[in-house]
Image: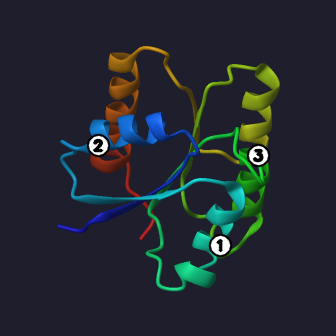
């Protein structure tokens, strides 16, 4: 069985920990790579600097509120890059702002999820992503 490579672009250590916890019992073998800002994310995706041997992710979980380069800029860059645009990008944001949601879809996000405030609801949201993207949908190969 193939190991799914997940790139989590998230600067909040608590949300990183919750995401790891939610994926701990995932049915599909996976490896969670974490980067903490937009510039680091693009270095990882372009395999530059310390990321020259980085695994190409099968799916990206992207926060919008990031230091150095915000999530909208990262999303737009990914979806304009012929070598990256095939990778599904799931927005995980605290923002329920209509403009953020519309901009994300205009930049070709594959899904937009508002991060739940509640621990159990957050875990459920990430596990729902896992069930859909790992068990139902076919990821790019």
Q: Tags 2 and 3 in contact by the CB under 8 Å rule?
A: no
Colour pattern of the rendering:
rainbow
Local crowd at mark 1 within 10 Å, few (<14), some, or many (≥20)? some
The percent position of residue 80, horizontal first and vertical second, equals 77, 64
The span from disc 3 to disc 1 (Cα, nearest Å) is 16 Å
At x 60%, y 71%, the residue is: 45
Is residue 57 toward the left or the right of residue 103 in the image?
left
Q: Earlier in the sequence, mark 2 or mark 3?
A: 2
- Relative to 81, say whether 123 is above or below: above
Circle 3 packing at 10 Å, graded few (<14), some (14-19), many (20+), is many
Image quarter where the C terminus lies is bottom left
**Numbered disc 3: secondary structure:** helix
The answer to whether 35 is drawn above or below residue 44 in the figure is above
Is 36 positioned to the left or the right of 126 in the image? right
Left or right: residue 132 compared with residue 27: right
Q: Upstream in the sequence, badge 3 or badge 1?
A: 1
Per the image, label 1 sits on a secondary structure element best described as: helix
Which image quarter holds the N terminus?
bottom left
Residue 118 placement: quadrant: top left
Q: Residue at x 32, y 34 (%)?
A: 127
Query: In this view of the protein, can residue 85 be seen by the observer?
Result: no
The residue at the point 38 percent across, 55 percent down is 138
Q: Say whether disc 1 or disc 2 marks the residue closer to the N-terminus.
A: 2
User: Can you identify the residue that label 1 sits on?
Assistant: 43
Identify the residue under disc 3. 72
Q: Position of residue 11 (x, y in %)?
A: 58, 45
Using the image, tell me which numbered label, if any, was put on residue 23.
2
For residue 30, above or below residue 100: below
| Numbered tag placed on residue 104 in the rendering | none
């Amino acid at each position: 069985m193939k190991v799914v490579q997940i790139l989590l672009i998230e600067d909040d250590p608590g949300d990183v920990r919750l995401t790891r916890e939610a994926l701990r019992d995932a049915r599909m073998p996976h490896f969670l790579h974490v980067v903490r800002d937009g510039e680091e994310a693009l270095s990882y995706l372009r395999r530059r600097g310390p990321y020259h041997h980085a695994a190409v992710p099968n799916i990206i979980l992207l926060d919008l509120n990031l230091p150095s380069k915000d999530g909208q800029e990262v999303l737009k860059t990914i979806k304009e890059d012929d070598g990256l645009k095939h990778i599904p990008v799931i927005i995980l944001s605290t923002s329920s702002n209509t403009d953020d949601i519309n901009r994300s879809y205009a930049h070709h996000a594959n899904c937009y999820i508002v991060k739940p405030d509640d621990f159990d609801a957050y875990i459920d949201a990430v596990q729902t992503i896992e069930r859909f993207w790992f068990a139902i949908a076919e990821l790019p190969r």
